[in-house]
Image (cartoon, rainbow, N blue to C red):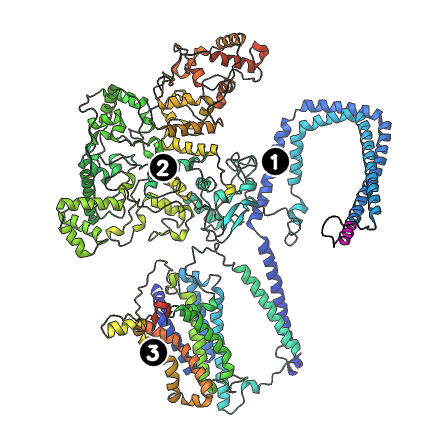
Amino acid sequence: MADKRAVGHAYNIDFLNVVFAASSLFVLFSTMWMVWDDYDREWKNHQRDFSLLQLEVTRAGLAQAERDVDRARVAELEAQRAAAEQQLAANAAQVTELEDQLADVNRQLFVATQNFNFTKAVYDVDRYSFEVRRDEAHAGDHGEGEAEVEIAGRDEVTALYDRWLAEGLEVERLTAERDAIRGRIAEFTAEVDAVTDELAALTGEADRLRGLVTDLAPSLIDDYLLNAPLLDFMAPTLTVRQTITPNIVDDVNFIRVPKMDRCQTCHLAIDLAGYEDYPQPFRTHPNLETYVGSASPHPVETTGCTVCHEGMGQSISFVDAAHSPSTPEQMAEWEERYDWEESHLWDYPMLPTGMAEASCAKCHREEVFIPEADNLNLGYGMYERAGCYACHKTVGFEDLRKPGPNLTRVGSKLDEEWVARWIRDPRAVKASTWMPKVWYNSNTSTPEDAVRSEVEIDAVVAYLFANSEEHEPAIGFPGRGNAENGQRIFESVGCLGCHIAGGESREAAGPRRTFGQPLQAIGDKTSYVWLFDWIRNPRHYSPETFMPDLRLNDFEVADVATYLMGLTGGGGTEAGATYEPADVDEALLSYLRAIVPFEEAQATIAAMSPEERQLDLGRRAIGRYGCYSCHEIAGFEDVQPIGTELSQEGSKLLPQFDFAFIHAEEVPHTKRDWINQKLLDPRIYDRGRILQPLEKLRMPDFGFSAAEARLLTTAVLSFQREVQPRVSQVQRSARKDAIIDGRNLVRRRNCIACHEIEGDGGDYRELVEDSSLAPPLLTPEGAKVKPDWLYAFLRGPITIRPWLEVRMPTFGLDDAHWNGVLDYFAALSDTVGPFRTHERVADAGTLETGEELFDLLRCQQCHVLDTIPEDQDVANLAPDLRMTAERLQPDWILDWLIRPLDIQPGTRMPTFWTEYPGSFYPQFDQDADAQIQSIRDYLLTFSGGPSPLQGN
Amino acid sequence: MDALKSFIDLFADPRLFFLITLAALVLIVWKREAFVSNRWGWGLMAFLTVFFGFGLTDENFNLIITKPDNVPIVGLIFLLVFFTWFSMRQAVDNDRRAAAGRPSIEKDEEDRVWTWPDLVYTELISMVVCTVILIVWSIGLEAPLEQPANNANTPNPSKAPWYFLGLQEMLVYFDPWLAGVVLPSLIIVGLMAIPYIDKNPKGNGYYTFNERRVEITLFLFGFVVLWSSLIVLGTFLRGPNWNFFGPFEYWDIHKLEALTNVQLSEYIWVRGFGMALPENWFVREIFGILLTIGYIAVLPVALAKKGLTRYYEKLGPARYYVTVLLFLSMLSLPVKMLTRWVFDLKYVVSIPEFFFNI
């Protein structure tokens, strides 16, 4: 070996051989590692786990199905089948002969069909080539009338066509012959087949599950060979499962592409009922009726997953799919199990559990309130009640009234001392108020800030009172009433639908039952005279108020006002500092410095009297903090609101949110956490910064609870730019428009605080002991009552159920609004339009039977007919039937009698025709329809009940 | 430990960083005899290894050097140092041989070997080893993917590909048309022109330093100091908003730098003459314009007369002027850097009226 070196080798070849061998081994090992690295995926393990789980669940289902099979019937049928088979065996010779014939005919039919198809193929070729030749021959022709050129081959084409027809006839003849033979065989086997079919029907479910168990059972070929590394390109059983949605898109900024959701690769049971209690990723979707299920409005095949849940649908890795934990505990668990971290690969991480409704608005953008999106609707309700839209312009929430009370006549209602205490810390006065705290927040909490806060508070109060108009109460010196009676009225007529008076928290009451101001401590707030005037007629003080009229007489008003004056407490907070006139000047100077040069600012201040300085400061402070966004304040009629527009806040990218010195350990650096923290402490992002007074954040503190902040975060995240194509969005129509407008109206006027409509609202029901004593459900109202009656009722409500204490108030809306309500109910029931004929063909005989049934079913036991039934529990009482003809839609009465519980769940109205269309009652040959009609027709003969139509 | 990190952070300031690399170049050239010793070679490698090993223990530096985009640049640093050292060693070795009257290594060693197996076999092994490295690398480091590109949300910092980071660094000191168009074109044209300018046959086919002192020093200055070290600076030391960050410093997106740069015209008219800036842009910028003309037109002529007369005579006017022009434009970068650092000079000529700045 040594001689090789001598003849001019640079290296020792033996050594090179060793190096080569070693490097070859390395390349082999690294290639194997590469294959394994490519092969080993977390989703495959999920699929393996799931097939075991599925096997277990299916086996349990099979065991249950086998238990459910009617053994006796199966044995009986099997005996029958044995007998029938015996009979069949007796005719075995004939059957065998027929089967031989059938085989022969089948063979002939096969040949004939093949000939037929081949001839057709040859014919098509020849015909086309003939057509081409003819076209070429006529290539020079330009018009009509040129002589036909004779082309060879035409006859052959025709002959082929005839042959093809003839062969077709042969096929038809043989088919008929075959069917005839089959029929004759079936005559012999008919009995056996019938029994076999019945047996299959009995054991079908068990057989199906048994087949499934066989399929799912572990098998060498399916589970190991087909899924082996390098072999799994052919027909693996572990596969990525994806849904591509042509009409739901991902916006990747330069183009919009159909979503490709691979969530089902791991969430294998998402569309399978029966996995509700298994841990993720193998849990059934919690609402298959609305989502995922193929019969739901959002089937997974066309809707996908990430359009609602967000996250990166293409990803099949837990972390890259951008799962978002909903609690810190879950986050810790994920970090442990999956090495979870906030994904940086996707701008829109998944919404945590409970916040997915923020995505509804992507496609339901035409609507504001969306059916079944209860969290989102509650969030929107809160967004409106807290008045977020007043400072932050938001599409869908434009042109709403100012959410706070009118302050242009504040001097006649309140005194300065109370207002100063109030705005210093509203929740110290009324714990449940929506009025936020503007001063003394986390970025204005130092003693120096306190001086400035007091200066501004006093200046704002001074401005409000200096600009307050006079208000003359309708009754100057009202007498006092009975507080006890006042409390009874207050707690029963329906005030509690919008107001809370006790210690109930705002979070527990929710935005609907705090729609009106909380009345805690109102006795220390205002005067008896003002309160009396307000309850008597709220519009007298504030013409634009939404507070309706409950039609109390002056004595009742006095009682209620006296009761409310007794609600005292809530002393508020004392001033945190005292100040000198120079502090006012300094504050005013800081405002003026921002707009004019220093000298000019000083000169302006010097020219003012101390009072003028304070008023000017008040005006500027109101302008800076945006008080006028929520309240009518003189001098601010045309000023724009102060907040950032939020119409597309949910689409903003994370880098556009400034966390300042709030570190990720305290507030995770995600969009939802930023918004959530902003709601919990609006000034937090000023922490640790050196800021001049006018540079500080100024959003006031609403004292939101964690749950309130979460709902509002969901609402804010739902404000997104338009990404999904029109075809995926809710389609507009006249009916849809009516529903959308109506939904907004019943929420913005707080109808749904008392009435449940479309499954939402009806909070007042919790306040009455029996739901039949609560305001009615209004979802079927359009089908139920006549529009002209409803219109009259809404304008001037009458008492339908005198035993109810809660009252329908008079809202004093204009006709446009009432028509909106009518259209809404009509659209909900799909009964748009006021005119529907009902031809009454009741003859005397029918009415007689109707009356007979009316007595038989003892309708009058609960229903009023002029007189209220005695000895009856009030919860069982029902409306006066004399109103029927004027009030109810005749068709609806039929429907109501058939299925009252479906129309109004919880109603006390009994279902008399439980066997419908059958009947227990002998009349009309037990024809339920005829019986019901006769009762209806009999009811329509009544008249003279209370009516809103009179006098309208 | 933190004090050490702060100390290193301090030295990584672009000014010091540049001066240190420049000083290192001077030392390498000047003390090359010592530099090429094995002790120095191993020492440098050991220093780099220790430095990056130490860097891995720091949270912030770890993020930067283990970023899949930056890993190859760490490797390139090792290669750059090694090859600089190695070629210098060969050159010094040959110079010693020449001084002793012996032929160069290249001539001396008659180690012609067989194509097979010596060449082809080693090439094959190299290919296999490279394949192994690439496979392991691709398994070990995942592709540095990011979220879908968005023109409303550019990454911060937005960095050029690593090989252009030197150019990007020039943008700090020059107007984009100079840093992005003129200077890169000159670099390419200049590199292409070298064979036509440099007709000196010395050093062809063998390493040497003594026979090509100026050329090698200039090359090392242009390549190692201006090009490679600026790439290193751009990769490891430039963070959000293109602010400078020490290797162990947290990349704070809110970090601010006081921008207090001043135009030459303001220096002369306002601070020098104590008067307002002239309205007319030509009058205003006349000193800058004269200075620029002086730099690119008068200076080469003056140098031909005195200072570089030897080169002028050796190269002839055409080659001389092209060479000097290329040399001066290369030198304009450190000149501009120095004036920025020392005088806060923003632009020599600044004519915003038609977007022209030098």
Amino acid carrying label 2: it is Met
Q: CA distance from mark 1 to mark 3?
A: 89 Å
Instruction: Look at discs 1 and 3 and give the one toward the viewer.
Output: 3
Query: Where B45 falls versus A827 (above or below)?
Result: below
Which residue is label 2 attached to?
A382
The residue closer to the viewer here, A322 or A105, is A105
Give the foreground label among 2 and 1.
2
Q: Position of residue B99 (x, y in %)?
A: 48, 90
Q: Residues within 10 Å of mark 1 (few under 14, many from 20)?
A: some
Place of residue A333 in the rendered image (x, y in percent of width and height, measured from the top left):
45, 46
Amino acid type, callout 3: Leu
What subunit carries mark 1? A
Chain letter for the residue marked with disc 2 in the picture:
A
What amino acid type is highlighted by mark number 1?
Answer: Thr
**CB under 8 Å between discs 2 and 1:** no
Q: Is residue A367 above or below residue A756?
A: below
- Of the pair B295 and B241, the residue shown nearer to us: B295
- The kind of secondary structure element at disc 3 is helix
Task: Please give the name of the residue rendered at 59% of the width and 10% of the height, measured from the top-left corner.
Answer: A925
Residue A301 relative to residue B177: left or right: right
Quadrant, the C terminus of chain A: top left
- Please name the residue shown 50% across and 89% down the image: B98
**Residue labelled with disc 3:** B291
Query: From which residue to which does the magenta span run?
Result: A128-146
Residue position marked by numbered label 1 in the rendering = A58
Instruction: Tell which tag, 3 or 2, sits nearer the viewer.
Output: 3
Question: In this rendering, does residue A9 appear at all?
Answer: yes
Of all residues, the one furthest to the front in this rendering is A145
